[in-house]
Image: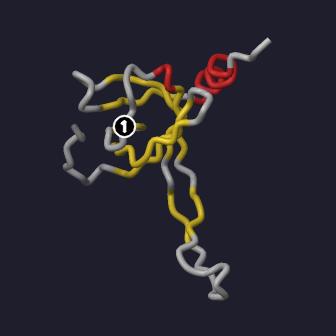
């Protein structure tokens, strides 16, 4: 018997760790409330060095991401869409869908920008 990964695993994760976010897209008539798992952890950045013999620089950066279950969203998520999470505005930098019905949205802080939604 095949496991329904979307409902059993992704659904359980969203139920346990998900939070409501506001999604704005040019494809939608108005902003909508959707569910996602937000993480703003730090990730390493290796700008120079490593294999070429030059000493690497140890830099880290905050990388906000939102994990989503695609079936829960009422339309196609696109690069450039806006999300309000915990009263902060983020722009979707990249959508990384997997083959199991989920996607990781890489985000940029959009608090100080005035760019419109992409058409």
| Residue at 47% from the left image edge and 47% from the top image edge | 106
- The x, y position of residue 60, in whole percent, is 55, 66
Q: Name the spot of residue 97 as percent of width and height, x first.
A: 53, 37
Say which residue appears at 24% left-offset and 52% top-offset: 113
| Residue at far bottom of view | 54
Residue reaching furthest top? Answer: 1
Q: Is residue 115 left or right of residue 63?
A: left
Q: Nearer the viewer, residue 17 or 2?
A: 2
Q: Nearer the viewer, residue 102 or 18?
A: 102
Q: What is the quadrant of the N terminus in the image?
A: top right
Which percent across, then down, holds residue 65? 50, 45
Q: Position of residue 96 (x, y in %)?
A: 51, 42
Q: Residues within 10 Å of mark 1 (few under 14, many from 20)?
A: some
The residue that appears at 64% across and 17% down in the rendered structure is 7
Q: Which part of the image, by quadrant, shows the C terminus?
A: top left
Quarter residue 32 falls in = top left
Judge whether 13 appears above or below 85 on screen.
Answer: above
Count of numbered marks: 1
Q: Residue at x 57, y 52 (%)?
A: 41
Residue beneath disc 1: 78
The colouring scheme, among rainbow, by chain, secondary structure or one colour, is secondary structure
Above or below residue 74? Residue 119 is: below
Secondary structure of residue under mark 1: loop
Q: Quadrant of residue 73?
A: top left
Camera-side residue of 13 and 71: 71
């Amino acid at each position: 018997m095949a496991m329904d990964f979307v409902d059993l695993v992704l659904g359980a994760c969203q139920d346990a760790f998900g939070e409501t976010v506001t999604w704005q897209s040019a494809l939608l008539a108005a902003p909508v409330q959707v569910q996602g798992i937000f993480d703003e952890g730090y990730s390493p950045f290796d700008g120079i060095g490593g294999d070429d013999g030059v000493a690497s620089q140890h830099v880290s950066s905050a990388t906000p991401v939102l994990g989503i279950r695609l079936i829960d969203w009422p339309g196609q998520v696109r690069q450039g869409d806006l999300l309000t999470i915990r009263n902060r505005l983020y722009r979707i930098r990249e959508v990384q869908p997997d083959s199991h019905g989920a996607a990781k949205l890489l985000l940029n802080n959009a608090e100080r920008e005035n760019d419109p939604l992409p058409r």
